[in-house]
Amino acid sequence: MSELTGLYAIWEREFKIFLREKSRIITTIISPLMWLFIFGGGLGSSFSVGNFNYQLFLYPGVVVMSVLFSSIFYGSYVVWDKRLDFLKEVLVAPINRVTIFFGKVLGGVTDAVLQATIIMILAPLFGISFGLQFLLIYVFLFILIVGLVSIGLTIGSMMESPEGFGLIVSFVNFPLFFLSGALFPLNNLPEWLTVFTRLDPVTYGVDAIRSLMIGVSTFGLAFDFLVLIGFGLLMIGIGTFAFRRMKL
Amino acid sequence: MIVEVNNLTKKFENLVAVDGINFSINEGEIFGLLGPNGAGKTTTLHMLATLIKPTDGNASVNGFDISKQSSKVRHSIGIVFQEPSSDDLLTGYENLKLHALMYGIPRDVALKRIDEVLELVDLTDRKNDQVKKYSGGMRRRLEIARGLLHEPKVLFLDEPTLGLDPQTREHIWTYVEKLVKEKKLTIIITTHYMDEADRLCDKIAIVDHGKIVVLDSPENLKKVLGGDIIRLRVENPNLDAVKKLNYVKQVDNLDGNISLTVSDANAHLQEILNLIGKVSSVEVHSPTLDDVFLHYTGREFREDDKQAEGGFWQRAMTMRARR
Ligand SMILES: Nc1ncnc2c1ncn2[C@@H]1O[C@H](COP(=O)(O)OP(=O)(O)OP(=O)(O)O)[C@@H](O)[C@H]1O
Ligand SMILES: [Mg+2]
């Protein structure tokens, strides 16, 4: 019981901070919009993918991109908590570290889901409309975000400084993003590149979301689902392990 | 004995931060850990608070073993950390509510106690301000209030007044004294400030390089010196002559700053001045804990102290710039 209130306490704190930090929300929304309007609009005026205008093809990829970046970046708040003694205040409380980890995961999921929602509200601007399958979109986003937030938290739990965190994260973010098929279709790639795209878990998130939004899929929803669940569980496992071992 | 510490040891890589210390504390006592930077005070508190594991030895707090019953220990203690540890984007009130939730305090009890502790530290009228708008002293008081919220048996205060102005320090001392009287708390306090330890503590352990050099009540510690202290600045002091005097108990010389422990200084001052050489300044006082520290370690305490000043503030400032 007290673990449950502990979980709620951690989540509530993260959520309050999220709401109080307008700059955090605004910057994470501006950058996807720039991708959509400038990159998507620019390339879209001369390219199309299959039957789709490039901007339309890009849209699901950008939704995933926004959750990718904000989920992983969320781990940096652990580093900030560590810089002060706030993290000690949490760790000295009579709640399990696993509970603390899950409270943080929920906080990160809330942030990322809200950001994705804001971008999805703009869907009609790009000629996309979805009916009830938006519920499925949320299911897939949720699973993907849980895995990504866990990566961010794992890195955060191991780093001492925000600079160090930023450095590591840029080595993680960009391969995950560029290999995910958010920007280009995965069908006609050279073989070596195909291998790497298949190893990127985000690929299956992009595939699922794109399939639900504009009906194009490389792997099929069932396969995407299984891979993402596996990825989420693995990252939760690694994350709880990292939080248990976290040094002050 | 509400706190018992046996041979507690902590090694970091090849540095021994805490080196086999032993002490015990009675319920309702204020126990001081006094020592320079890096002496191992914080490390000791963190082990007792179950935040880090001892390399060797063991300890119990409120009857619970710190290694085997850490959850029970955590329920029994409150801690105010050396660095700021409240969330500055939350209000003071929200910080307290967060704490109450984490400690599983039922809602109605929590709301009542939050009001009580806010009253105790005089923050009721600022409770709805974000902590980033607090002064260093207010923030410290908030963290003390938070440490009390779950009614711990033992309160750990890690340098509660570091970097605060004298008036605020005085305030915090008054709170601490009030707490012990009203709540029968046991308190472990670490400090750089001799006057703080002297004023508050029933027992003081002077720690240096991870070891307890001496442990006693402030009165006894000062009595051990058995006399008054004469501090002099002398060029080419003639120490041998002074050492032969039977009423001179101890002679310490730090680069021409001489410290003499003398029984009845007033009666013998003239003779010492005649013997010792060309004196440029002289000061006589009854022994302070500074003198005790010098007596036991052969080092001046205050030299180490300087760099620590303002640490709290620096951290508070970096914190403001975050996010
Ligand atoms: N996590 C750590 N890893 C390595 N060394 C550490 C760690 N924490 C503390 N130390 C070292 O252990 C020693 C004791 O540190 P501690 O913080 O306990 O001292 P302190 O008495 O609290 O000092 P201060 O008055 O500066 O707060 C120091 O030499 C410090 O550098
Ligand atoms: Mg310390």
Image (cartoon, rainbow, N blue to C red):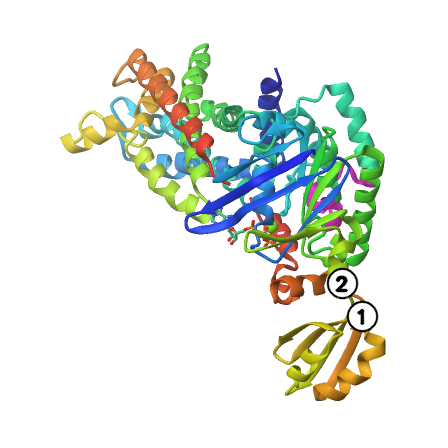
Find residue B86 and report its horizontal and vertical position in percent.
Answer: 65, 40
Identity of the amino acid at label 2? Answer: Thr
Q: Is residue B131 magenta?
A: yes
- The lab-note entry on whether marks 2 and 1 share a chain reads yes
Left/right placement of residue A47 relative to residue A35 reads left
Q: Is residue A231 above or below residue B59?
A: above
Please, which chain is the residue tagged with disc 2 on? B
Query: Could you say where residue B270 lies in the image, as x and y percent from the top left?
Result: 81, 84
Instruction: Using the numbered discs, state the Cα–Cα distance from disc 2 to disc 1 in whole angstroms.
Output: 8 Å
Q: Residue furthest left?
A: A191
Res B285 label: 1
Viewer-nearest residue: A204 or B302: B302
**Label 2 residue SS:** loop
At x 76% / y 64%, what residue is drawn?
B226
- The answer to which of B93 and B30 lies nearer the viewer is B30
When the figure is inspected, residue A16 is found, relative to residue B248, above or below; the finding is above
Query: Is there CB contact under 8 Å for labels 2 and 1?
Result: yes
Amino acid marked by disc 1: His
The residue depicted at 54 percent of the width and 25 percent of the height is A96
Where does label 2 land, which residue? Answer: B288
Q: Magenta span covers which residues?
A: B121-140
Name the foreground residue: B127 vs B23: B23
Residue B190 shown in magenta:
no
Is residue A37 at all visible to an observer of this figure? yes
Q: Is mark 2 within 8 Å of ligand 1?
A: no
User: Horizontal and vertical percent for residue B148?
Assistant: 74, 34
Q: Residue at x 84, y 36 (%)?
A: B119
Q: How many marks?
A: 2
| Residue B297 in the figure: left or right of residue A76 | right
